[in-house]
Image (spheres, coloured by chain):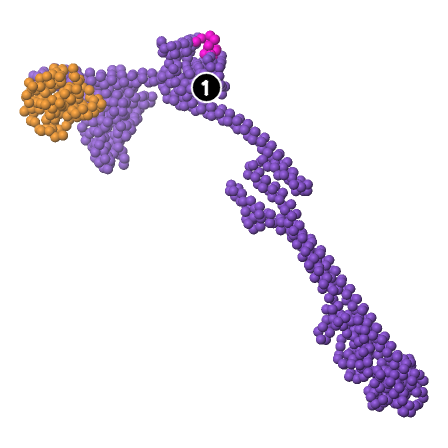
């Protein structure tokens, strides 16, 4: 699956994460990459609720264990959304089991990055995603 | 007979070809032939014999007659001769007379005897003294046949002395004085007259004078009857063929002392005419007798064959199954007896057949009964088998018993079937299932089965529990129609597991004959099957519960590990992330002490993460979910990559880390991350237990595999621990209690190597050091292409 390449400095990344600290960490780490704008939503449901208020989104990093609806339910909702349907969605989850990875692939995620994030590798992983590469890394 | 014979071997199923005409003709012809032979042959033999005898008699009679005629003729001839002799002798002149005297004598003699043709006087010395002119018998020298003349002289009688051919006959007569002989010449005609008169020879017979084999006077040669051999011919008679070809009967009588004789002949035709008449009569008689015999035979044969044919037809009718045969007895002979016996036999056969039929009917009836029993039993067995089959697959005891009652009721066609189970404590049995099911408030099923039965409470179920054996009770059912008699049967069969009664199958039904013993046996067998099925279902239930429990525990464990891993990772995310950010000085400069503390935090959180990863890996390996990403790996490079880590591990110790790896070591087919993990763990382990000395990493290869070993100069591992250290959650017994790790590392290493298709083992000596070695498959080009496509 080839996607358009987006430069980190131009990219707008939506992080769906119920833990604010994780969002902050990711924002900091992405800053190394040059990403200037990160959006935060605490759940998939909220993403849909505020989809209209969101501007251009180039990548969605989504936790799977979310309140209200989990990552898989949110994924299918987002996929059917007119505006966000085409945006690549990468799962970022602490459930790094083989089963979960397979499920993520089968469900239609565009990538998988296991938690805890490796602070040294994370910027590079996102860079590769933005360059259109598929990233499926449990650790 | 030809057609009859051809018809005899008729096919048994085809219509019978009865050869009646052939038989009739055959027997009739045989009998007729026999009769004709019996009549004609004796008649012919007798007739032939009679004709032959008659002919012989006639022949004998004719011979005798002809012979007597011949004798008679001779006597007459001799008589005539005597007359002439006496006449001549009486008148002859005495002494030597003169020729004139003799002339005178001849004249007077010729007057007296006109039959004489001439005469001569012969002297004693046989000279002719005198003769008439025509006396042909005198020879030229005047001498006659002296011997004959002499004989005639001596006997004083007339003797025929010559009968020449075409000549006159001559008669010699002795003169009375004895010195002379008188020769008298006879006239032929006279002699013939004497011969032919009073012949008595029928129409064709004749008498002849024969002289020296020739007829006289014609002089023809002739045959004489073959009387006997030798000359002169003797008197006799016989049958012969004359020279002119005529068959005749002839008789011959010689004239004494002469060459002459009398021959009398008569043709056989005339002689045997009577015989031919007899023969004709005989043939006519034989024909008449044959005709009469044929006629009589026809009647007799008909008398004989008709009963035989009647018998035959009756026998054939019998063979075709019509045993009702009677042939009327027509005669008191053997055939009559045969007919009588045949009738007896037919009656006997009919009665036997009747008996047989009665027996067959009886046997058939018994056979039908037996068949009915067998069929019933077969049905029961089939039903039993079907029920058994149907219930073996049912795992739920309650469902099983409900199905059992339904199946038994349907297959055996009972009014109702119920199963009681012994309640805990064994005192009473409770109704567990019934067919039809008891519906509260339904008047049809109410009171059909009691809810509870106790041992010995009087019910069939109670008796079955108390006695432990099948109980059958039948009684006439109440009915309003007398003709519709039926039996109501109740059966209770205990369900026995070994000696323990676990329940009772109860059956209630109403049929014509009630439940029979054989049916009870089938039900008992079925009850055993039900017991087994019930026990199986209960055992299955227990097993299933245990399995479910186990599965639940397993699932819980898996879920727990997965959850724990996830829940522990979540907080680590920020711990590791922010500590790293701090270490990089992005949040502001840190003094060395702060940096040291931060490093500690970061390292420990990393260790915690590795631990969590190991736990997760363990659970995934155990669940068979671990997958390798195999690719060609340069082991030399991999070792180089871990060297900084190794150096870090031994920093602060008097330990050196060295490598001994050949440059031409082949590539290996491996998951580099896992292989690195194995290597790091072995180095970590070595570093942990080695305080002084060295750690040596070696590698070597053969055609198929590459071997790697990590050798240390540490504390070593006792023999008893060498296998245990590879087990999950186990550690060496000599490990210090403060040594970190939960005992997953070596177990995981061995699992990883095993997943690659290699092996891991340890050699150690306590106090000297340990060597952990493992093998991984060498990378072969063909294999790689197949694998990279995965």
Chain to which the residue tagged by mark 1 belongs: B
Examine the image and state in which quarter residue B452 appears: top left
Q: Check if residue B454 falls in the magenta segment.
A: yes
Residue B759 higher or lower than B34, as above or below: above
Residue B269, quarter of the rendered image: bottom right
The chain coloured purple is B
Confirm whether residue B351 shows in the render: yes
What's the residue at 11%, 22% (across, down)?
Answer: A81
Mark 1 residue crowding within 10 angstroms, few (<14) / some (14–19) / many (20+): many
Find residue B740 and report its image quarter. top left
Q: Is residue B686 above or below residue B491?
A: below
Residue drawn at (60%, 49%) of the image: B25
Whether residue B491 sits left or right of residue B96 in the image: it is left
Q: Position of residue B617 (x, y in %)?
A: 24, 22
Return the residue at label 1: B523
Q: B408 left or right of A102?
A: right
Q: Position of residue B210 (x, y in %)?
A: 79, 78
Stretch of the chain drawn in magenta: B453-466
In the displayed structure image, the side of residue B616 where residue B271 appears, left or right: right
State the count of labels: 1
Instruction: Compare residues B176 and B419 and report the one nearer the observer.
Output: B176
Residue B167, x across and y down, in percent: 79, 84
The residue tagged with tag 1: helix, strand or loop? helix
Q: Colour of chain A?
A: orange
Q: Residue at x 59, y 37 (%)?
A: B325
Whether residue B442 is in magenta: the answer is no
Front-most of residues B304 and B357: B304
Is any atom of residue B749 visible in this view?
A: no
Q: Is residue B586 left or right of residue B379?
A: left
């Amino acid at each position: 699956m080839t996607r358009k390449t987006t430069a980190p400095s131009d990219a707008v990344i939506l992080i769906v994460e119920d833990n604010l600290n994780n969002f902050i960490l990711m924002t900091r780490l992405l800053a190394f990459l040059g990403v200037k704008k990160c959006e935060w939503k605490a759940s998939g449901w909220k993403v849909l609720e505020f989809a209209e208020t969101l501007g251009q989104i180039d990548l969605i990093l989504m936790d799977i264990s979310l309140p209200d609806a989990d990552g898989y339910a949110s994924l299918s909702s987002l996929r059917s959304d007119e505006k966000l349907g085409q945006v690549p969605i990468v799962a970022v989850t602490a459930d790094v089991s083989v089963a979960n990875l397979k499920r993520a692939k089968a469900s239609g995620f565009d990538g998988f990055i296991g938690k805890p994030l490796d602070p040294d590798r994370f910027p590079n992983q996102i860079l590769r995603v933005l360059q259109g590469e598929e990233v499926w890394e449990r650790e | 007979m030809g057609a009859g014979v051809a018809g005899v071997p008729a096919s048994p199923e085809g219509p019978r070809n009865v050869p009646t005409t052939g038989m009739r003709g055959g027997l009739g012809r045989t009998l007729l032939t026999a009769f004709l032979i019996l009549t004609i042959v004796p008649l012919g033999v007798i007739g032939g014999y009679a004709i032959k005898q008659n002919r012989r008699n006639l022949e004998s009679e004719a011979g005798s007659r002809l012979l007597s005629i011949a004798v008679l003729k001779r006597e007459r001839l001799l008589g005539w001769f005597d007359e002439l002799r006496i006449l001549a002798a009486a008148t002859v002149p005495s002494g030597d007379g003169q020729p004139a005297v003799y002339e005178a004598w001849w004249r007077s003699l010729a007057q007296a005897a006109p039959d004489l043709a001439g005469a001569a006087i012969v002297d004693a010395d046989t000279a002719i003294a005198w003769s008439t002119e025509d006396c042909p018998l005198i020879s030229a020298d005047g001498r006659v046949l002296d011997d004959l003349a002499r004989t005639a002289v001596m006997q004083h009688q007339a003797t025929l002395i010559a009968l020449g051919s075409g000549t006159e006959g001559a008669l010699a007569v002795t003169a009375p004085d004895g010195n002379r002989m008188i020769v008298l010449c006879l006239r032929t005609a006279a002699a013939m007259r004497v011969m032919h008169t009073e012949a008595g020879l029928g129409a064709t017979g004749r008498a002849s004078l024969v002289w020296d084999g020739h007829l006289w006077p014609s002089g023809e040669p002739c045959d004489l009857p073959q009387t006997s051999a030798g000359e002169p011919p003797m008197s006799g008679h016989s049958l012969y063929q004359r020279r002119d070809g005529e068959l005749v009967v002839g008789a011959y009588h010689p004239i004494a002392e002469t060459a002459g004789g009398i021959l009398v002949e008569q043709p056989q035709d005339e002689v045997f005419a009577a015989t031919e008449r007899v023969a004709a009569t005989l043939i006519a008689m034989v024909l008449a007798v044959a005709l009469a015999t044929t006629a009589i035979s026809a009647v007799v044969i008909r008398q004989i064959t008709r009963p035989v044919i009647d018998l035959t037809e009756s026998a054939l009718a019998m063979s075709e199954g019509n045993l009702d045969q009677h042939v009327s007895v027509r005669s008191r002979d053997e055939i009559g007896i045969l007919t009588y016996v045949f009738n007896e036999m037919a009656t006997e056969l009919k009665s036997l057949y009747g008996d047989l039929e009665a027996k067959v009917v009886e046997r058939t009836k018994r056979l039908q009964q037996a068949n009915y029993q067998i069929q019933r039993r077969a049905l029961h067995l089939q039903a039993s088998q079907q029920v058994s089959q149907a219930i073996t697959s049912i795992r739920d005891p309650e469902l099983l018993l409900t199905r059992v009652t339904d199946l038994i009721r349907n297959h055996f066609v009972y009014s109702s079937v119920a199963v009681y189970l012994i309640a805990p404590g064994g005192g009473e049995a409770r109704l567990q299932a019934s067919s039809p099911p008891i519906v509260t408030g339904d008047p049809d099923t109410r009171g059909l089965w009691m809810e509870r039965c106790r041992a010995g409470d009087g019910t069939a179920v109670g008796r079955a529990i108390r006695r432990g054996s099948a109980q059958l009770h039948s009684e006439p059912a109440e009915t309003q129609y007398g003709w519709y008699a039926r039996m109501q049967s109740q059966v209770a069969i205990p369900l026995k597991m070994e000696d323990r009664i676990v329940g009772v199958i109860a059956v209630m039904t109403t049929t014509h004959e009630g439940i029979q013993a054989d049916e009870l046996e089938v039900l008992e067998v079925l009850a055993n099957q039900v017991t087994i099925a019930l026990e199986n279902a209960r055992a299955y239930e227990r097993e299933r519960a245990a399995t479910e429990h186990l599965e639940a525990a397993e699932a819980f464990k898996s879920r727990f590990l997965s959850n724990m891993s996830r829940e522990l990772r979540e907080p680590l995310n920020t711990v590791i992330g922010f500590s790293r950010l701090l270490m990089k000085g992005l949040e502001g400069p840190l003094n060395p002490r702060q940096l040291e503390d931060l490093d500690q935090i970061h390292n420990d959180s990393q260790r915690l993460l590795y631990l969590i990863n190991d736990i997760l890996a363990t659970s995934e390996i155990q669940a068979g979910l671990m997958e390798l990403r195999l690719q060609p790996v340069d082991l030399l490079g991999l070792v180089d990559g871990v060297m900084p880590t190794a150096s870090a591990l031994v920093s602060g110790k008097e330990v050196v880390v060295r490598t001994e790896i050949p440059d031409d070591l082949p590539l290996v087919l491996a998951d580099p991350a896992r292989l690195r993990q194995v290597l790091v763990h072995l180095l970590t382990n070595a570093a942990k237990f080695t305080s002084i000395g060295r750690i040596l990493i070696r590698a070597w290869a053969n055609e198929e595999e590459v071997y790697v070993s990590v050798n240390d100069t540490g504390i070593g591992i006792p023999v008893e621990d060498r296998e245990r250290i590879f087990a999950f959650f186990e550690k060496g017994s000599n490990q210090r209690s403060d040594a970190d790790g939960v005992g997953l590392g070596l177990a995981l290493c061995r699992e990883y190597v095993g997943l690659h298709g290699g092996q891991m083992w340890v050699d150690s000596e306590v106090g000297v050091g340990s060597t952990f070695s493992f093998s991984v498959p060498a990378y072969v080009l063909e294999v790689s292409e197949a694998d990279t496509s995965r």
